[in-house]
Amino acid sequence: MNKTYCPSLTEYKRRLSREVKIGDLPMGGLNPIRVQSMTTVDTMDTLGSVEQTLRMVEAGCEYVRITAPSTKEAQNLLEIRKELRKRGCNVPLIADIHFTPNAAELAARIVEKVRVNPGNYADKKKFDLIEYTDASYAAEVERIRERFRPLVQICKQYGTAMRIGTNHGSLSDRILSRYGDTPLGMVESALEFLRLCEEENYYDVVLSMKASNTQVMVQAYRLLVQKLDEEGLQPYPLHLGVTEAGEAEDGRIKSAVGIGTLLEDGLGDTVRVSLTEAPEAEAPVARMLINRYTNRAAEADPIKAVSAELLADSFPSNKKANSEQLSANSSINSPINPFQYHRRDTHEVLNFGGLNVPRVVTDLSRLPRLEYADLRAAGQLYSPFLDKFQMSDLGADYIYTGERPAPFMLPNGLREIVTHGAWRAAGQRADHYPLLTIDSYLHDEAKLHPELNFLLIDLASVDAQLLARLRPERRVVLVLDTANAHAMPEMRQAFFALIKAGVTCPVVVRRVYSMGNPAQTQLDAATDVGGLLIDGLGDGISLCTDVLPTSDQEALLRDIDGLNQLSFGILQAARTRMSKTEYISCPSCGRTLFDLQETTAMIRKRTDHLKGVKIGIMGCIVNGPGEMADADYGYVGVGKGKIALYRGQEVIKKSVPEEQAVDQLIDLMREDGRWVEKEFLGEPVVG
């Protein structure tokens, strides 16, 4: 597949974009990846906006975006800017514009950058399907271009930069009618505006393709870069972000899956992490994501040459390629379509692979002893009073106990993996599944479990002999591991080797992390594993701690429990296994019509037991209903103290008093048969 969106799939190479000057702080080119965020204070509150901006800058924001929903707010950007400069703060300001070209044209004369959304800048969204002829479509595009042209000319005159920011949920009816709700529609929406910019010889442009769905977001950015290259357009810098990621752990994981995947591709020149929290909380998360790549290109990749030789040997079409050529052309040699999700074809082994959802394996082998109550770290809650287990929504499918099998019967539905040696020592029990080394697999074929065996591999160990043996194998699930700092690209190479060799065994992705910094581990794991899942690679996940067994069993259990929950969070963020309620909530801004953080917390408290239900919580009509594109239900601010409730993208109740809105949202779920009451297991459970 001849695709050039990515500089390299086998090593970290950052895409070289055009440099764009935004005030005194340029973006793109050889500049560092920048951090930005957006204020949540009413733009007419000058001092409030200034104080919040100062806190954001202190937290690490290099650009600050402020909403300007009308010319009134756009004009007040001048007062905000004056006060910031008076206080010695020269952070570049970005005006965020929706619906109002007049506000954009005014703001472009005041601030360093304006952001426009092509879906609602001189365009409309009423969820109407419109039949266009080529001529009528071209006429509509020309009308929009003429409405956009004055802004381009003003920006060019004043030296103001611009972000053309497409949002998945706010594509216009025109784009949806022709391209559908697709990454291609998102890209074309931006390119219509970008082509006019180049016609006007205006190049201070940044592009973004934001979506709440991480698969759509990643595909759209990749396709955008591909289309820029195909059309001979400038390599404009990219603003990365997952819109409406949510709050707390879920918001951070979802952001890392989307943003981290693209950073691994070498894409991205600025990052905004959109959390339903105070904006100063966003910058440190963005910085942690970015910092992984600060020295990445300079780090040695000890197995790059080995992997290149392996790929060249494994694939007849590449036998003449040396390792340097293969690395340079890695995107051309990709056996997957990076612009459309397709899960890697695998055969079923027990409940792995095939049509099964990815499985979670929780590693309990570090525990010095295993007791009933310890299974809570794997999502199995034990009640001593009832002497029974209850599996939570985050209950692992398998536990790995290593050399010491569980000394008791496991609850129904939970399976156990042990080392091959422990399995043989225990009499090759049918209810234990062995983890084999490559040596034991190749030389002890008679001593395999008849249904399911796990084989631990890494890229360096995958050779022609192993691939030939695995091709007809139907009893083995591979456990892919790596200790490489370039974990995601190395594992991606291993998957490519399996695909091109015709090996269809399911694969569990295994990663070992230190829990000394749980916040960093969340982001690292979501990037390393989530990036593979986004491309349809992986049939299971096993996140392990590197903490050695100690007498502090409780601390170790907390680490294991955290990694188990993180595993399910990554699977959900990558849209490969829905195991809990998903909240698509915007990060709040000056347009927000209610306390978004408090409302999100209240809705979560009452609905977080609804497995697989997606609820959109939007602060204003700009972000809803479009931005909650694939939510089952929506809660959208439409006026002071007034809420609109949605089923999908259809408004059901238009003006509900805020104090009644959550109850009426639950009533709507009851009408649809989607509501269930919370269940409790008699007495409080251990842990």
Image: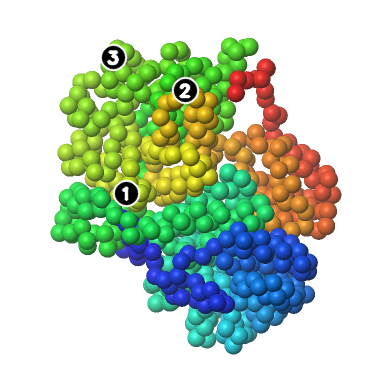
The image's mark for residue 626 is: none
Mark 1 vs mark 2: which is more N-terminal?
1
Residue 557 seen by the camera: no
Residue 470 seen by the camera: yes
Instruction: Locate residue 607 relative to residue 200 in the image: left or right.
Output: right
Whole-percent x, y for residue 216 in the image: 50, 55
- Contact (Cβ within 8 Å) of mark 1 with mark 3: no
Residue receiving disc 1: 490
> What distance separates the C-alpha of mark 1 from that of mark 2?
35 Å
Mark 3: give few (<14), some (14-19) or many (20+) Cα within 10 Å. Answer: few
Q: Nearer the viewer, residue 441 or 684?
A: 684
> What distance separates the C-alpha of mark 2 from that of mark 3?
27 Å
Whole-percent x, y for residue 616 in the image: 66, 49
Q: Residue at x 42, y 40 (%)?
A: 513
Q: Nearer the viewer, residue 256 or 84?
A: 84
Whole-percent x, y for residue 170 in the image: 62, 62
Q: Residue at x 83, y 57 (%)?
A: 640
Q: Amino acid at mark 3?
A: Ala
Secondary structure of residue under mark 2: loop
- Contact (Cβ within 8 Å) of mark 2 with mark 3: no
Whole-percent x, y for residue 604 in the image: 69, 40
Viewport quadrant of the N terminus: bottom left
Mark 2: give few (<14), some (14-19) or many (20+) Cα within 10 Å. Answer: few
Residue receiving disc 2: 551
> In the image as oriented, which residue stretches furthest toward the left?
320
Residue receiving disc 3: 425
Q: Residue at x 52, y 69 (%)?
A: 207
Viewport quadrant of the C terminus: top right
